Image (spheres, rainbow, N blue to C red):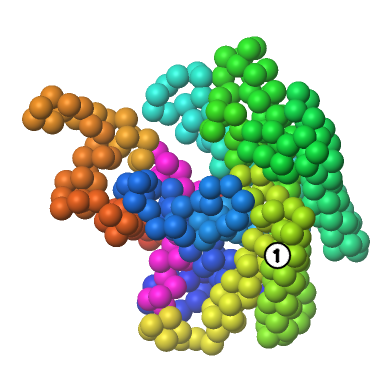
Amino acid sequence: MAVSSISAGTAVAAPRRVLSVDMLRGITIALMIMVNDAGDWEHVFGQLDHAKWNGWTLTDLVFPTFLFLMGASIVFSMRSREAKGDCNPTQVGHIFLRFAKLVVLALMLAYFPRMHWTMRIYGVLMRIALCYLIAALILLAVPAAHRVRVLLAIVLTLLVGYWVLLRFAPVPGAGHPVRDFPLLDPMWNLTAWLDRCVSGFLLKWLHTGTLYQKTRDPEGLLSTLPAVASVLLGALAGMWMRRPQSDRRMQRGLALAGAVGVVAGEVWEIWFPINKNLWTSSYVLLAAGLAALLLALCSRLVDQREQPWPRWLRRMTWPWFVFGSNSIVAYTASEALEKVGSSLKIADAEGDRHSLWALTYENVFARHGSNEWTSLAFAASYVVVCFVPVWLLWRKRIFLKM
């Protein structure tokens, strides 16, 4: 599979990166920033907010798409390191080092800017770190000759096993699902119960470890298992892209696998509803299927394309390559700037204190009233602001890896 680096207005340089993966990752990160940073959460278009519980929106597809692409990237990275002569112990050391960097970054963002020890430990970066560690070690441990079959077996075990746990395992203090309370009840499900247990233990002994939604957390411990399946499905896609074959055959295979995933997810929803908060198995299949379809489309658009590219294509794809080349930097910048803007308080003429974040929205975007469009305009503008630091890194050809 050809890999390259690209810049606006120039030809593709020597092999370096998989363009379709960078492009889709850039789109995903831009969407992640936009849906996380609405100007007014009382006025948000339905597709730019998470589903309240069961069901899904465009926003619910963003995070699993990132994990899917991370799985593909792990495959490409390991192949690159193998080509350089890195042995397994060296690769294990690299995996744990990257995991540690992501954990430290996650804890720093959780600690900042309140500088208070009692904080949420779960979160997007912590889930990325855990999923990366588990998936990368699995890929390294499984022999290449049997990797596809073993990964499929692991994915099947994770998804079916998670369904069995949430469908049949009793929840202490509540009883059995379906018989004593509804399946996937927001309060009474095994995932939420375990989150409360872990949080209670951490708060008692370490005085930290709050939950995002008080009684449960969308990035909790047990739901990390199906999230690992999302990464492994991406790894399978990456392995398929690596196979010696024509680009057309590779793209058709990705699209076919994506369509199968979407159908399987929608069918499984009958018995195990699609639910992002619990990262249900049907949700994993649906999201991975749609990610594979999008990756096939991006690959058709940019991979192995003859040079020079048309001007319209260079201009259309360039921002996504910039975002995709330093995706963690872009996400970290968006989180840090939002925390600073929300914590800085400024007094108005009446002496009331408002955050810089709210004042910017009210005085620049919503001067004549807040609605879905002004909220979206603020979020889109914030994406542009977060683009600046990764663009500066791009210009200097600096690609930071955690």
Q: Is residue 163 magenta?
A: no
Is residue 294 among what the camera can see?
Answer: yes
- Decide: is 50 above or below 315: above
Query: Who is closer to the viewer here, 30 or 302?
Result: 30
Q: Is residue 315 magenta?
A: yes
Query: Who is closer to the viewer here, 272 or 35?
Result: 272
- Decide: is 313 above or below 363: below
Task: Please provide percent x and percent y for residue 153.
Answer: 88, 56
Task: Please provide percent x and percent y for residue 73.
Answer: 65, 59
Q: Residue furthest front?
A: 179
Query: Who is closer to the viewer here, 70 or 141?
Result: 70
Name the image quarter holding the N terminus: bottom right
Q: Is residue 190 left or right of residue 122?
A: right
Q: Which residues are magenta?
A: 314-336
Query: Counting other residues with Cα less than 10 Å from the Cα at mark 1, is it few (<14), some (14-19), or many (20 or more)?
Result: some
- For the residue labelled by badge 1, is the local secondary structure a helix, a strand or a loop? helix
Residue at the image point whose x is 56% and y is 25% from the top: 210
Main SS of residues in magenta: helix
Residue at the image point whose x is 72% and y is 58% from the top: 269
Q: Is residue 341 left or right of residue 99?
A: left
Residue at the image point whose x is 72% and y is 62% from the top: 265
- Decide: is 249 above or below 189: below
Is residue 79 among what the camera can see?
Answer: no
Identify the residue position indicated by label 1 in the image: 266
Q: Amino acid at mark 1?
A: Glu
